[in-house]
Image: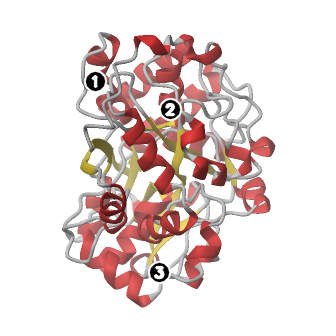
Amino acid sequence: MDVPLDPAVRALRRAAARSLATRREALGAGMGLAALAAVAACAPPPPPAGGGLDIRALPADVSARDRTLRFSNWTAYLDLSEDAKTYPTLAAFEKRTGIDVAYAEDIDDNDTYFTKIAPQLRSRQDVGADLFVFTDWMINRLIRERLVAPLELLRMPNATHLLDTMKDAPFDPGRHFSLAWQGGFGGIGYNRRKLGRDLRSIEDLWADDLRGKVVAVSEFRDTAGLVMLAQGVDITGSFGKTEVENAFGEVEKRIADGHIRRIRGNSYLQDLKSGNALAGLVWSGDLFSLRAETGDDSWQFVLPDSGGTLWTDNVAVPVTSPRRRNAEALMNYYYDPAVAAQVAAYVTYVCPVRGAQEAMEKIDPALAKSPFVFPTDDFLRRHARVFRALDADEDAEYGARWAKVVGN
């Protein structure tokens, strides 16, 4: 299913994208956006009540006298101006509030970014950010380890615009520690013109003429999750080591027989851009960004017949931040439906804000109808599945095993 882009929006994004690296590295499957109760059979274990965090241990908040904020995010995860020099919605926030935001695209992988800042977080030393964005499975870990600060929801009235099914995430009951930033799908990307046909299943990727022409994302919850779905596994349910190993084994087989050219993180789209690869297991928004950047509408993204993966990224405040109220002001701003629609028009990932779809009608009516940006309950029930939360032992075991697969 395609996402038609208004010509003006397409031109804007193509110009902006020339200066951007590809977004995303290791996104995991998360909560989903609507009808999630229908697709998520297993929820992460809830964190300790209140996260077990003594708010008196947080650094004194200096927001009233220090009108600055440091926001760490993924690449191409915020609207960018045509000259690729400013972020229009961020500039509007700064003008409205007087808060100067140092915005950094310094997150390219959940694990690597967390590993970099974890020692400082755990010792309560400054990590250089007042806001950061992590995927559900990782934000669950941070909440469990009491590394994110509680939110003052009364200061964020726009948080009520979150989609109803996201207001009480299992890893964050009541949304006291995080808010959804964007969501997306894992599925199949390919160039219809160069291939001369459409791809609809994981098995289609293993055609002879695609040998050495397939790439895959390095997050096993998506790549292996898609393979597991094709093998008939319910990734939302009580699968175990056998099912995971079967999927890992299939990926290893396709690497060994030369079908999968490589498994990559932040740079996987480079192989598609260069023509070294014609298809892959990819993330939805990246393929739409590729279409806008290259002006080639032959690039397609589809959810396989067996189903696609679904995940959500979440924004939170580290326990080390002394500017929590500035951070909450920015979070509140981005859950204004009109602002959320501006961001969604650029990033083309799933928008988590109620009312943004109506606001999108004024920006790009075609995009407002896209199920990849504003999915319906029925679309999610039929096409998307959430990779269930792993316990700490599973996470460590499967992660170590996957590292060997990727390292082959």
Hey, what amino acid is under mark 1? Answer: Ile
Q: Which residue is mark 3?
A: 196
Q: Is residue 270 above or below residue 2?
A: above
| Mark with earlier residue (2, 1) | 1
Q: Is residue 95 above or below residue 365?
A: above
Q: Which mark is residue 248?
A: 2
Q: Rounded to the nearest whole Å, what is the CA distance between mark 2 and mark 3?
A: 30 Å
Q: Residues within 10 Å of mark 2 (few under 14, many from 20)?
A: many
Hey, what amino acid is under mark 2? Answer: Phe
Q: Position of residue 8 (x, y in %)?
A: 39, 88
- Residue 112 visible? The answer is yes
Q: Position of residue 323 (x, y in %)?
A: 33, 33
* Quadrant in the rendering for residue 81: bottom left
Residue at image point 34% right, 21% down? 60
| Mark with earlier residue (2, 3) | 3
Q: Which residue is mark 1?
A: 117
Q: Position of residue 388 (x, y in %)?
A: 65, 31
In this orientation, which residue lies closer to the viewer: 146 or 152?
A: 152
Q: Nearer the viewer, mark 2 or mark 1?
A: 1
- Label 3: which secondary element: loop
Tell me if 353 is positioned left or right of 296 in this view.
right
